[in-house]
Image (cartoon, helix red, strand yellow):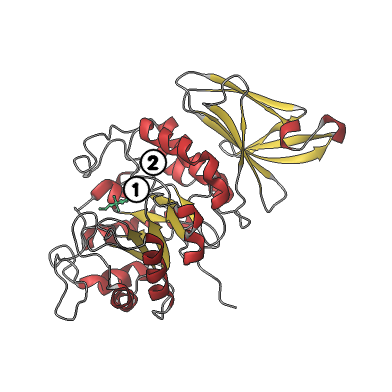
Amino acid sequence: MKTPLAQTPPMGWNSWNSFGWNISDKLIRSTADLFVESGLKEAGYEYIIIDDCWSEKQRDEKGRLVPDREKFPEGMKAVADYVHSKGLKFGMYSCAGTHTCAGHPGSFEHEFVDAETFADWGVDYLKYDYCYKPAAADGANLYRRMAMALRSCGRDILFSACNWGADDVYSWIRSSGAQMFRSTGDIQDNWFNVNGIICSQLDKSPYSGSFCHNDMDMLVVGMHGNSDNSEVLGGVVGGCTDIEYKTHFAFWAMMNSPLIIGCDVRKMTDITKLILMNRDIISINQDIECRAPYVIRQWNNPEKVFALIRPLSTGEYAVGLFNLSDKKAEMSLQFYDIGLPVSSGRGLEMYDCYTHSIAGVFTERYVTQLGSHDCAVFKARAVKL
Ligand code: GLA
């Protein structure tokens, strides 16, 4: 039997956060090289995705999309072949409207010819945006159309819907056939924005699952305020601290969001690499059961301090403790709340996903102090005392 696409959340890199319009054949090839050299590929990152601004402003005489002749002088097939030669997969971008968000041709009323073109070029992943959607067109129907076009184009192309959570997307996207769906507006490289995305998605986790994942947007981990996009994003970029990047990554992983890197991988620091390639955090994100976490809030600071809990296929539970507040805070996870009463005669053996070692066996509760904007993540197992 053929394995369906995206059983677990897709992992990769996308050009938009760091490069915006400033993309090229050379950038994509060097990113593919670095995926292999830096260990990203081995850590599970697979897709190299070109976002907006890759095409000429006009289609050709047959109505086909044309790659920008200066940025991609050898065309897209050559880029795809190079990415494939590294054992990686190649992603591209289009839009359900008449134009992409940056004003290039969109796929509206060209869905089938575009899917065919992407298949000819060797594309494995299509991000599909929502700008310039004609007001009279039904959004759900446009995503169904492109899903149909991709599913009949003769090549496996993962369909990454990007309508920013608009039009009640949660209620119809899974049945459209898309493998992931953007649920938020564009992420920005600062804590205020990342924190806002976290708070907006806490109650949305049940909508995500195998074969159709809630995409909370591309990661800003490791950007440190360096983006060619600062102007596009209104100059509100700023950067995050490494602690904030660690928490951002852990939250996306716990929520089963796709992990699509947005930094310039040629400039990753050692700490950025540690965050992005933490095998234990990635294993939680990639757990085959893709179960949604539930939230347990700290009684005296419920808005800002909470735990996310989810069962893993290994018999363990992923436990993420988060402090979104601007001060150090206590988080006390009462085991009763996660189904382990004292009467069970059991405690939790907690494996720390940052030290990669067992922190101990705890009974009744686990209490810790979390620094401002910091988190702790464990894999916990119920054991007899
Ligand atoms: C929208 C999307 C972004 C990016 C840009 C490109 O804003 O949400 O992720 O693709 O368009 O123009």
Q: Is residue 185 left or right of residue 106?
A: right
- Res 308 quadrant in image: top right
The mark that comes first in sequence, 1 or 2, is 2
Q: Is residue 178 left or right of residue 107?
A: right
Amino acid type, label 2:
Val
Image coordinates of residue 90 in percent, x first then y, are 36, 66
Query: Can residue 230 be seen at all in this image of the molecule?
Result: yes
As drawn, 68 above or below 148: above
Residue pictured at 41% horizontal, 77% vertical: 155
In the image, the residue with mark 1 has its CB under 8 Å from the nearest atom of ligand 1:
no
Secondary structure under badge 1? Answer: loop
Residue pictured at 34% horizontal, 61% vertical: 128
Taking depth in this image into account, of 82 and 382 the one nearest to the observer is 382
Residue pictured at 73% horizontal, 36% vertical: 349
Amino acid type, label 1:
Gly
Q: Alpha carbon of mark 1 to alpha carbon of mark 2: how far? A: 7 Å
Tell me, yes or no, whether the two marked residues, 1 and 2, touch with CB atoms within 8 Å. yes
As drawn, 383 above or below 103: above
Residue pictured at 50% horizontal, 55% vertical: 171
Q: Is residue 10 left or right of residue 192?
A: right
Query: Is disc 1 surrounded by few (<14), some (14 to 19) or many (20+) residues within 10 Å?
Result: many
Q: Quadrant of the N terminus?
A: bottom right
Taking depth in this image into account, of 77 and 92 the one nearest to the observer is 92
As drawn, 85 above or below 307: below
**Residue 185 marker:** none
Q: Which residue is mark 1?
A: 262
Q: Which residue is mark 2?
A: 221
Q: Quadrant of the C terminus?
A: top right
Taking depth in this image into account, of 361 and 251 the one nearest to the observer is 251
Image coordinates of residue 230 in percent, x first then y, are 22, 40
Image coordinates of residue 4 in percent, x first then y, are 54, 70
- Tell which residue pokes out farthest to the front in this image: 136
